[in-house]
Image (spheres, rainbow, N blue to C red):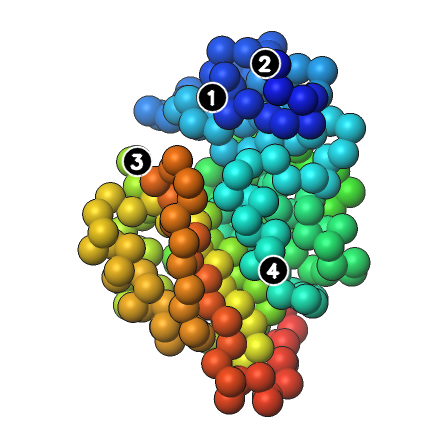
Amino acid sequence: MSNLPFDEFDVAAATSTGALIYWERNGEQLLEIRADRHFRWLLLDGVVQSVLQQATPGELCLPHQRILQALMPAQAAQVLHLGLGGGDLLRWLHHRYPGVQQTAIDLNAQVIDIYQRFFQQEEQPHLHCQDAFAWLGSGHQQYDLILIDLFSDDGSPAALFQSATYEHLQQHIAPDGRVIVNLLPRTEQEWQQVQHLLAGCGKVHSLRIANYRNYLIWTEPKPAARKSPARHSPD
């Protein structure tokens, strides 16, 4: 893609390099898949969403994902993904937590199809084509890790700033579980709002990704929660 080492993905050049192997317009949204000898990547409206390294598909390539690696809990048996993209974290967590059960929710049927055709490897997640926030309001399955990676237009969706969403999250997070949000705030107030609302799920931390608008916001179990064993309800 550039003069970078072959194992470094060049985000800045992603829209103009590689061969275009898939193209589809879904309403106003443009989905593209490009590939070269080393990588295959998904773009939504020209923004890189997922990258698969051909030689080692389980590796993470994007800057915020490498930070995410350090935020993961030591163990997780049940993981929920709100937002799918090309399933980068599905592939990585499949190797990080042997035997993990993963569930991914995405409203876009085309994105699910693209993941299955171009990016899915050994992992076998439970996939649901549904509004992620509506899905949160149903069922009582608890998860050790909930990853939220949802976007709408030029930022994060409105439901991510509403208290009802976090009431549902509290029902789905295991007592010793963790929530991680990849947030694209339009204002500082949105960032502060998510931190405030997420506090019901645990002790909140956040950091901004260098050279990006994104913030990673995550919880750690509160001390009292660590004394309670995690329980999981059947599907």
Kind of residue at badge 1: Ala
Pointers 2 and 4 in contact (C-beta within 8 Å): no
Q: Give the number of the disc on residue 153.
A: 3
CA gap between label 2 and label 1 equals 10 Å
What residue appears at the point 67 percent right and 22 percent down from the top-left corner?
A: 5
Q: From the viewer's perspective, is the residue at label 3 or at label 2 nearer?
A: 2
Circle 2 residues within 10 Å: few <14, some 14–19, many ≥20: few
What residue is disc 4 on?
72
CA gap between label 2 and label 4 equals 31 Å
CA gap between label 4 and label 1 equals 27 Å
Q: From the viewer's perspective, is the residue at label 2 or at label 4 nearer?
A: 2
Circle 1 residues within 10 Å: few <14, some 14–19, many ≥20: few
Residue 38 coordinates in the image, percent (x, y): 70, 21
CA gap between label 3 and label 2 equals 29 Å
Kind of residue at badge 4: Met
Q: Is residue 121 above or below residue 187?
A: above
CA gap between label 1 and label 3 equals 20 Å
Secondary element type, mark 4:
loop
Relative placement, left or right, of 114 versus 32 is right
Kind of residue at badge 3: Asp
Quadrant of the frame with the C terminus = bottom right
What residue is disc 1 on?
12
Quadrant of the frame with the N terminus = top right
What residue is disc 2 on?
2
Residue 59 coordinates in the image, percent (x, y): 69, 39
CA gap between label 4 and label 3 equals 28 Å
Residue 72, quarter of the rendered image = bottom right
